[in-house]
Amino acid sequence: MAAQGKNFDNTLHSASIDRDVFKVIDSDTVYANGTENHRGDDASRKESTEFLVKYRDRVYNIQNFLNYHPGGKNPLAHLKDQVLDKELAKNPHSKSAYYLLEEFAVQHQERYNECENLINWNAPLLWQVGFMGDRYWEWVNLPVNRPIRYFQSEILEILSITPWYILPIVWLPIIAYFLYMGCVSNISTNIAITAQNILPSFVLGLFIWTIVEYFVHRKVFHFKPPHNSKLLITLHFLFHGSHHKAPLDERRLVFPPTFSLVVAAVVWQIYKVIFPLATVHLVAAGTIIGYLGYDLIHYYLHHGAPIAGSYLYTMKRRHNYHHFVHHDQGFGVTSELWDRILKTDSILRKLNEPLKW
């Protein structure tokens, strides 16, 4: 659950809470002590699959959310089987956070929000979102915890999903080829001259990537499509909107090679026009390494647990702000450079204790 403003990371740190362990008894009876009676079924629920909390008379099992909580799992550790009303009143959360919380409701059998009635979650979404009109932008920025299916075709669906480890398998050989071709044409018996010939072009490629990363994310991925354009709404959802709608869906955190290789081929043709033959391979190698680092770091920021005080720890906090509080800030994933220069950087609050995921 993401908190609003300066309370974002440190959500639920206060120990001042009603400690009465709760029970809820109705058509879907839930006991906070780890047992369940569901319509006459007295079977016990395994405690390892339960982390029950209660908020506004509804019971939530947030076991599967603990490692993804933007404010870390350590602030939640002491809240098992507790009522959260007072705690959340003292630590206001964003609209996105409360919306996501409903995904973990124990009694969640119905569609909990009329906004989700705009589409059929049991059918592929890609061809539905274009018909949402002026409701699309609100809907896509309210996160859910469920997988997203794009296509009816199994083949197209498989091609649209990429495990993170596929990226190094695909891109490292390509990077090695470009580095080899670039070094061969710039190698010298003098190591200093060789470095002078190679490093500037390679660093230039990395620098170009930082610009691409920031401006594509800000100007393309966060472009608000016109409500009357089914095509632009569909494209927005395909390229980035689905990630904000389902930020916990690990299958769609990296770009499928089926798409990125086509883009790379186009960019390569542009590079050959812009850069001399002696440097073009090195510039391309730097850009591709920048892209590969971006996709892998992006995956890690969502599913990794960086050590407090590390660079990735700070970037994870910034990225959580971007998803759950300020969608118009924190566009850099691997670097804060352009966010700082262009004043779109998120201001992270100081914490009493480091976050743990």
Image: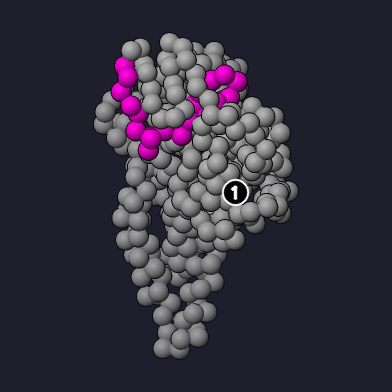
Does any portion of residue 215 appear in the rendered image? no
In the displayed structure, 235 sits above or below 296; it is above
Q: Is residue 330 left or right of residue 25?
A: right
* Element marked by disc 1: helix
Find disc 1 in the rendering and name its residue: 317
Screen quadrant of the N terminus: top right
Q: Amino acid at mark 1?
A: Arg
Q: On screen, 53 above or below 56?
A: below
Q: Is residue 53 above or below residue 356?
A: above
Please rate how many residues cluster around mark 1, counting C-alpha atoms within 10 Å: few if below 14, some from 14 to 19, many from 20. Answer: many
Q: How has the structure been colored for display?
A: one colour
Percent position of residue 287, x then y: 48, 58
- Can you give x and y, in whole percent of width and height, for residue 184 in the image? 37, 75
Q: Is residue 70 left or right of residue 256?
A: right
Judged from this view, the residue extending furthest toward the bottom is 190
| Residue 138 lies in the magenta-colored region | no
Q: Which residues are magenta?
A: 41-61
Res 205 seen here: yes
At x 49% / y 26%, what residue is drawn? Answer: 60
Q: Nearer the viewer, residue 9 or 117?
A: 9
Toward the viewer: 302 or 18?
A: 18
Estimate the x, y position of residue 126 in percent, counting from the top left. Answer: 42, 24
Residue furthest toward the left?
Answer: 155
Give the residue drawn at x 32%, y 19%.
Answer: 42
Would you identify the image quadrant in which residue 110 lies?
top left
Q: How many marks?
A: 1
Question: Residue 305 versus residue 294: which sits nearer the camera?
Answer: 305
User: What is the residue that sits farthest to the front in this orientation?
Assistant: 20
Name the residue rendered at 54%, 16% in the picture.
113
Placement of 247 over or under 304, stated as above or below: above
x 61%, y 30%: residue: 84
